[in-house]
Amino acid sequence: MRWLVTGLTVVALLAAPVAAQPAKKAAAAKKSELAKKDMPAAAGLLDINSASEAELKALRGIGDAYAAKIVAGRPYRAKNQLSQKKIIPEATYEKIKDKIIAKQSAGKK
């Protein structure tokens, strides 16, 4: 009986790393998916004054409601106005601030 328990223990220990492989691959895929979501269009900065709602929703933490509020609050002189005007929460702004810009139109000063 003791050899049976020992044998099953060895099999369980050998099988554990193999069973963990799909979990690691799933975690890596999810991380890759999040990284893609964090990347704005064309890997450049996304202009909050001209981006579509769909482009805004590609930013982490920005859903339908926040994207609509950003569009409705245009134009912005600076990107930090998103949090100053309480368009989005400060925590959400911190997540996207390095991925956005607030370009000014050529005709206005």
Image: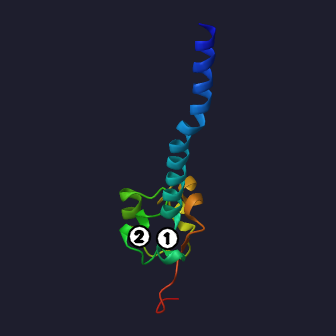
Extreme residue in the top direction: 1
Total labels: the figure holds 2
Looking at the picture, does residue 63 appear above or below residue 72? Answer: above
Q: CA distance from mark 1 to mark 2?
A: 7 Å
Mark 1 residue element = loop
Is label 1 in contact with label 2 (beta carbons under 8 Å)?
A: yes
- On the rendered image, what quadrant is the N terminus found in? top right
- Front in this rendered view, residue 27 or 101: 27
* Image coordinates for residue 78, horizontal then vertical, percent: 56, 74
Mark 2 residue element = helix
**Within 10 Å of the Cα at label 1, are there few (<14), some (14-19), or many (20+) other Cα atoms?**
many
Looking at the picture, does residue 89 appear above or below residue 42? Answer: above
Q: Residue at x 46, y 92 (%)?
A: 107
* Image coordinates for residue 92, horizontal then vertical, percent: 53, 56
Q: Residue at x 57, y 67 (%)?
A: 80
Extreme residue in the bottom direction: 107
Disc with the residue nearer the chain's start (1 vs 2) = 1
Q: Which mark is residue 40?
A: 1
Q: Is residue 65 left or right of residue 31?
A: left
Residue 13: name its quadrant. top right
- According to the picture, the residue beneath numbered tag 2 turns out to be 55
Q: Is residue 73 left or right of residue 34?
A: left
Label 1 amino acid?
Answer: Pro
* Image coordinates for residue 89, horizontal then vertical, percent: 52, 54
**Within 10 Å of the Cα at label 2, are there few (<14), some (14-19), or many (20+) other Cα atoms?**
some
Label 2 amino acid?
Answer: Glu
- Front in this rendered view, residue 38 or 62: 38
Residue 73: name its quadrant. bottom left
